[in-house]
Amino acid sequence: MARYNRQPKPHRRAESWLELQEWLFSDSWQPGLKRFRSPFAFRGTSNLRSGLRTSLARLGGDFASMEPHLLRNFRKYAMHDGVDQQTPWDWLALAKHHGLPTRLLDWTYSPYVALHFATNDVDVFNGDSIVWAVNYHEAQHYLPDTLRRVLDAEGADVFTADMLMQVATTLDAFDALADEPFVVFFEPPSLNPRIVNQYALFSFMSSATAHMDEWLATHPELCRGIVIPAELKWEVRDKLDQANINERMLFPGLDGLSRWLKRQYTPRK
């Protein structure tokens, strides 16, 4: 279990709302485009020490051997609510979206959506949170040549299900593309408004047993952690709510409305 404690060390601690904005949007300017287009994917977690473990790894035991059984049974029982495209990548995204333990990690293009998930649990406001930022544009330089050629041909920085199918039609074929671990950033299909509103992005490693924490520890130039101190959380949370970055917007429907109202009316302790 000690291996999960290996992670890129967070090296920026925001002392104010303005400093937080500066760090979240730093390195966004793209001279070639003459536009502010950040190459970073963001992930917010309410616990600074939670790391970057997948839901599959958190099962414990021989979790890698469980992966094909989980996915096979999900497809078997989910046929009536399945996906239009029958690729393993579409099914993997659908399974993750509905809570099945997978090797996928949730990310977003939006630093504010990541901030929401770093500050949405008022029960842990006495501890620090973190927003991870990973440069998905630079991460592609560590991909196998076969995958890089697909990105180059499409002029893209991240993959879609159709693009992945050009190289690997199964998870086993994907894992066999290289001997060394690598990470892929994958834009899921727009399954419903929640995926769209959260500006969602997934990452996954080339093996169920490979961990993003450990991979980033060997490529620290790709990653930075922005710590939101406990004493700053209420200000961040209130300003996000005023900007309409909340459960009502990110989880469209009555479930999201109920989550938002519960948090809005929870007394500050």
Image (spheres, grey):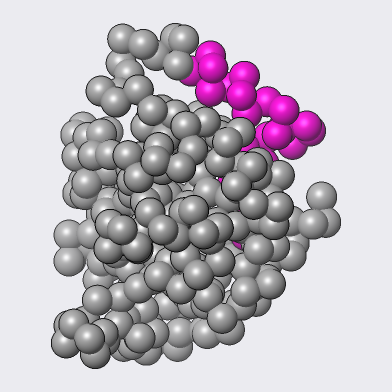
In magenta stretch: residue 251: no
Q: Quadrant of the C terminus?
A: bottom left
Residue at the location (53% across, 23% down)? 71
| Number of numbered discs | 0
Camera sees residue 222:
yes
Q: On the image, which quarter does residue 77 sit in?
A: top left
Q: On the image, which quarter does residue 256 sit in?
A: top left
**200 lies left or right of 4:** left
Residue at the location (53% across, 74% down)? 223
Q: Where is residue 129 in the image (x, y as percent from the top left)?
A: 51, 67
Residue at the location (34% across, 63% down)? 152
Camera sees residue 225:
no
Q: Where is residue 239 in the image (x, y as percent from the top left)?
A: 25, 71
Residue placed most toward the observer, 168 or 230: 168
Against 171, residue 120 (above or below) is: below
Q: Position of residue 161 (x, y in %)?
A: 35, 40
Q: Position of residue 109 (x, y in %)?
A: 31, 62
**250 lies left or right of 49:** left
Against 268, residue 249 (above or below) is: above
Q: Residue furthest right?
A: 2
Q: What stretch is highlighted in magenta?
A: 51-74
Q: Main secondary structure of the magenta part?
A: helix
